[in-house]
Image (tube, rainbow, N blue to C red):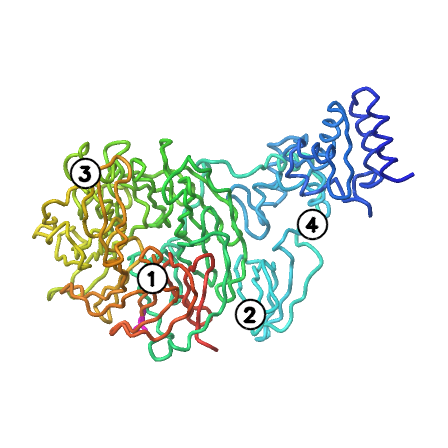
Amino acid sequence: MTLRTLIAGAAFALTASAAPDAASTKQLYTQMCSVCHGADASGTDRGPALAGNRRLRTRPASDIANTIKNGTGAMPAFPLPDDQLSPLADYVHSLNATAFEAKPAGDIAAGERVFFGEGNCASCHSVGGRGGSNGPDLSNVARQLTLPELEESLTDPAARIAAGYSVVSVAMNNGATLRGFARSRGLHDLQLQTLDGEMHLLSDKQYSKITEEKTSLMPVAKADPNLIAWLGTLGGASVGAITRPVAAPAPAEFEALLHPKPGEWPTYYGTLSGNRYSALDQINKTNAAKLELQWTYPIQYQPLETTPLVAGGMMLVTAPNQISALDGRSGREIWKYTRPRTPSGTIAGDAALGAQRGVALLGDRVFFNTDNAHMLCLNRLTGALLWDVPMTEAPQHYGATGAPLVVNDLVISGVAGGDEGIRGFVGAWKVTTGELAWRFWTVDQPDAGGSTWLTGTYDPETGLLYWPTGNPFPDTDGTGRPGDNLYTDCDLALDPKTGKLVWYFQYTPHDLHDWDAEQPPVLVNARYQGQDRKLLLHGNRNGFFYVLDRTNGKFLFAAPLVKKLTWASGIDASGRPILTPDNDTKPGNTITCPAVRGATNWYSPAYSPRTNLFYFMAVEDCGSYRQAKQGGFGFLNNPRDPGLKYIRALDIETGKTAWEIQQIGPVERNYTGVLATAGDLVFYGESSGGFAAVDAKTGTTLWHFEAGTQWKGSPMTYTIDGRQYVAIAAASSILSFALPQ
């Protein structure tokens, strides 16, 4: 008799019996399943374990029932009646129930006191942002482990050491010994978190031997039923601000953003000023031709728009609803945080498409915006979620795509969705708890647009926060929104402590062409028109370059960014555009320049104090516009006069172009920003797919790397152990370059 026949016979006999109770369900399992899966469901050579099976843990009982009924692979089908099939599937599912589902008995409040008190658990582990970082975060442990696994983690910690927390001792070449957690490791590198909470990013040139310890640093503990009962409630961080007291950040943490250490890139623009200029000069115009690719890191999304941040050698990169912490020397992943993307229909615009541009840092806190406009705070060492707060107060189609900005003890950000009729705002949240500190509305109506999705800038000299705003809604139909439509298409100067408006400058009053002002407000100190001035430089989507006095918003100068510019003949002495006739939108199509994507866009520019030049990507193109409640714009695609993209260098005093490089390829393929350095270089992505370094003074191309990719990120630079790197997001990878050693 074959095994299949034996099992089928048992099934037939049980089919004829009454519906099973708990005892008979276990008997049913024993008769039908144990021969392959074991009497204790621990598995045999004929079938896998059904108990403690992490794959089954994530499957509902209905899926398990279908597998029993229909079979899979070598497992035969068992045509049981529903009154036996369902209890059997439930029984198998129960073998994999998480501790959260099991709800272990005990005094939950007493267990919490043990964790944070006499048990000393919080000296290493954290829960909900409270505790240490010398052990795995336990905020979601009850959904990750079964009850037996949870108990075993206390009574036999070495039996189940979490990934990234194996203990090693490292013999360094300088004679020192380091001991800690191997958070990640390769054949030629080690990411070591020592017991003092420091991260050491090591190459094999720095150490001679790594010794693995086969034990856990966690002491053996008894299976305290109260502690287990409390741990069994930990099903993940809840949404909302932290209500308990949290210690204020140390002043040195914000000082590290105000005055970054040489070689660090701790904010979206590198500095709070918004100017992508680096004082690093190890890579310069005499040796740039020798640059080589050092590593790549793939991410399952494209095209990436993130700017990497680097502090303490650790790099942070993002994609929609995911953050990765990397070793900046090797690109090896240390930790990764992900959550599911928001279903389509609940968010709109670029957030729904997956745009995500980066994070903000303050000490060991990482701040990140989700696609559905939640602000998250994570631990930089572990990736543990500290708090999660919704940024909005009304359920419109809000999204978020930009990197937040930290100013003192507040994390500041804006929202996306202006083309869908949201009410835009800039908001500030306490870095410690996620509690809302203030909100500044950019428009006075609930569906008037004015989004705020690009990262702003901050000036400690004036004490002001500068934030760009988006276009009004509807984009191309102004009949229902008379006037200038404040505060759309503006740079706002706000008091970062209160959110109160100090001054504003509007670039495109009563915008009818979707020319938002979501371009970086770049803050520089420069000799300008014979005076030392505190300036704000803004290359605007409407086709003009502006210079403002950032202390008071006074208009100083404007000049065209592009030649194809038909909607205005210039800018008057007050800074308002001088409109040309017949460029208002109408029910029929009107051809106007620039095109809807603008003469430039959100991609980052840079200013070099060594050359007094402003570097940016420019688009020479025109578009078709018509009056419409939704959309209302189109591309011309004229083969006789195609749109062209350039990298340009502009003199900030005269507005004249010092040099330019025409790009090859579609203008929409390239959304690269630029990086200027003290090595007299400008880095950028070419429309034809290359990544290039050019002479900042002349525009001569000195080096390029053919990546064959689309660019939507802006380059940055950093150092590790005195070696300079240049990195950029390319399609679905992060690329990092350096000179040969």
Kind of element beneath mark 4: loop
Q: Is residue 690 visible?
A: yes
Q: Magenta span covers which residues?
A: 677-681
The Cα–Cα distance between marks 1 and 4, rounded to whole angstroms, is 54 Å
Mark 3 closeness class: few <14, some 14–19, many ≥20 residues within 10 Å:
many
Q: Which residue is mark 2?
A: 203
The residue sitting at the left extreme is 573
Kind of element beneath mark 2: strand
Q: Nearer the viewer, mark 3 or mark 2?
A: 3
Indicate the amino acid at tag 4. Answer: Arg
Kind of element beneath mark 3: loop
The Cα–Cα distance between marks 4 and 2, rounded to whole angstroms, is 28 Å
Between 659 and 178, the one lying in front of the other is 659
Sequence order check, earlier mark of 3 and 2: 2
User: How far from the left and from the top, in percent, is residue 614?
Assistant: 23, 64
The disc placed on residue 160 is 4
Q: Which residue is mark 1?
A: 665
Where residue 13 sits, quadrant-wise, is top right
The Cα–Cα distance between marks 3 and 2, rounded to whole angstroms, is 56 Å
Mark 1 closeness class: few <14, some 14–19, many ≥20 residues within 10 Å:
some
- Which quadrant does the N terminus fall into? top right
